[in-house]
Image: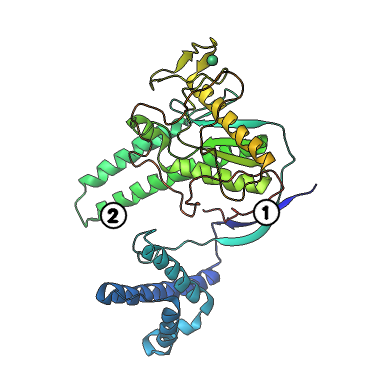
Amino acid sequence: MASVSVVKRAFRYRFYPTPGQEVELSRTFGCVRVVYNRALEARTAAWFGEQRRVNYVQTSALLTEWKKTDGLSFLNEVSSVPLQQSLRHLQTAFAAFWEKRSRYPPAGRWHVSILVETTVDHAPPVDRVVGVDAGITSLLTLSTGEKITNPRHERQDRERLARAQRALARKEKLSANRAKAQLRVARVHARIADRRRDLLHKLTTRLVQENQLVVIEDLAVRNMVRNRSLARAISDASWSQLRSMLEYKCDWYGRDLVVVDRWFPSSKTCSACGLLLDMLPLRVREWTCPGCGARHDRDVNAARNILAAGQAVTACRAGVRPTRRQSARHPVKPPSGEEAGTAGREPGGHSPLQGGEVVNAPGAPTSSPTPPHPPRSRPTRRTRPARG
Ligand SMILES: [Zn+2]
């Protein structure tokens, strides 16, 4: 059965205009900036002055007025489409601000991207399945036993960032050197984010291409927030990025993604016999099951349990189609073997909700569980433009 997903993809390009185009563009961008900042001023005056909300239609009416005034008649010389678009962007930014989803919109910052509706062929079905553990010593550990480590450059980049930030702190306020130091910090930041996104894209594409089912844990990475060095290694945003990439790529390629509940005791359950340990301190990297004698690597064992939980969810669904979003909300017993006992929240008092590690990806679904879905039998829903 040929299957495709219709998706929206955003492409971001570096663009090298001719001198003529450059003049035209800078004139257009100049006008867009004027319109955006004027509309922002009007909204700011209304909001902070009178707690009044200005909407898109009102700013659009303002634009019509501005075009008639002598000092702003140059706004008529460029296409009105980008001008209107900047007002729409501002409306979106304010809507997010009013709903407390983001901070007050800042003055002009511009990105150019092209949104294209396109189709993606589903990848041919494969038999392989994988569970992914959010590692401690590794970035990711797979149920296959493979460990994916943090790239070496990440540490170097962070050291570079720390140096740039220290240098910035030493500079006098409002000095030219301070501006340069700020620019340097921003560049290092951008480079770190670029490299991380690149790495996550490679990893997620590979996982989705190689496997029909990918099982991950819910964002809060169990018990990890207490560990400072780990918190650094994971770097907050990476996990939400990883998850959202897996979500849309699974949609694109016709794969299943199951997100298992964060209370599932994946580390302390023997993946061979299902025995649940009372505790397993973080420092214990390898252990032997007292029930069946199996020797476990902590993270690989966790990844195997995560996979088993995800498979249990898909098996349940094969019988009963859910109508709502669901996940392995309740702990799922690993297959086979003795009673796993009252598997539930892992004791030890570490709440995965502590600390500030859990960051929702912008635009990611806010309801926590990701609905798994059978391949090619379900309308694509979570398609959305890739963010660049
Ligand atoms: Zn065992």
Residue 104 % position (x, y) = 34, 63
Circle 1 or circle 2, nearest the eye:
1
Q: Nearer the viewer, residue 197 or 306?
A: 306
Q: Please give left or right for residue 281 compared with residue 340 in the image.
A: left
- In three-dimensional space, the C-alpha distance between marks 1 and 2, rounded to whole angstroms, equals 50 Å
Q: Residues within 10 Å of mark 1 (few under 14, many from 20)?
A: few
- The amino acid pointed to by label 1 is Pro
What is the x, y in percent for residue 120? 69, 51
Would you name the residue on which mark 2 appears? Answer: 179
Q: Position of residue 85 (x, y in %)?
A: 50, 72
Mark 1: secondary structure: loop
Residue 79 seen in this snapshot:
no
Report the amino acid beneath label 2.
Ala
Asked whether residue 93 appears in the rendered view, the answer is: yes
User: Which label number is shown at residue 379?
Assistant: 1
Residue 340 higher or lower than 161, as above or below: above
Q: Residue at x 38, y 27 (%)?
A: 347
Of callouts 1 and 2, the N-terminal one = 2
Residue at left offset 43%, top offset 70%: 91
